[in-house]
Image (cartoon, helix red, strand yellow):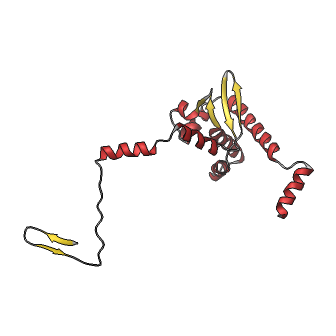
Amino acid sequence: MSGFDSPNFKKTVQNPNQRPMREFNVLPPEMENQKFEQANKISSFGKQRLEFLANLCRSSKDVEIEGTTFSLRTLKGYENKEVIQIAYGLGNTNIEVLFEGRRQRLARSIFKIDGSDIDMILGSSTMESKLEMIDNLEENVIQKLSVEFDALNQEVNTKFSISTEADIKEVTEDLKK
């Protein structure tokens, strides 16, 4: 049912083909915010489950340098792609590509320092804050972390590579299927 309601004119028109109008109840803004906060909160179990799934097949390694422990982890495919795009994308020289690539990899690889989450230590989860932290480390610390990151990657590559005849045969049989 639709109609017009004004001080000068009032008329109600009924259209049999028209669906009834919907009615929406809208909460005051302060109550809406509370509703969204409750809906967006994740339980501690849910958070642990998400972290587990997100880090599935990710390897990590603790590196101690002068009493400080840096926890490094392997990079995901999209992270490696970002590193390469940034390092090569700026028209850098070969030397600049090496330094920028190392800087970008470490910023993505370091996830804890002395057992505390890097985002909590930095007070930010932005890539800029992580890159700034890398820039402020001593060069010998950066070199050590980079060498350890490369060793972790080599270890993972060896672990998942096809190296024995049995592995080759298994992969060949899977491809034939």
Q: Nearer the viewer, residue 121 or 131?
A: 121
Q: Quadrant of residue 143?
A: top right
x then y, percent, for residue 122: 54, 32
Q: Residue at x 55, y 35 (%)?
A: 119
**Residue at x 53%, y 32% (from the top left corner):** 120
Residue 166 coordinates in the image, percent (x, y): 90, 51
Quarter holding the C terminus is bottom right
Measured along the vertical axis of the image, is residue 18 above or below residue 32?
below
- Give the camera-side residue of 170 and 134: 170
Q: As drawn, which residue projects farthest toward the left?
A: 8
Residue found farthest to the top: 67
In front here: 169 or 89?
A: 169
Residue 59 position, x and y percent, is: 71, 39
Where 36 sits versus 69, above or below?
below
Name the residue: 70% across, 26% down. Answer: 64
Q: Is residue 30 left or right of residue 62?
A: left
Instruction: Give percent across and percent down for residue 113.
Output: 62, 29
| Residue at the spot 56% in from the left edge and 38% down from the top edge | 45
Q: Quadrant of residue 155?
A: top right
- From the viewer's perspective, tell me whether residue 151 is left or right of residue 116: right
Task: Locate the N terminus by quadrant.
Answer: bottom left
Q: Residue furthest right?
A: 165
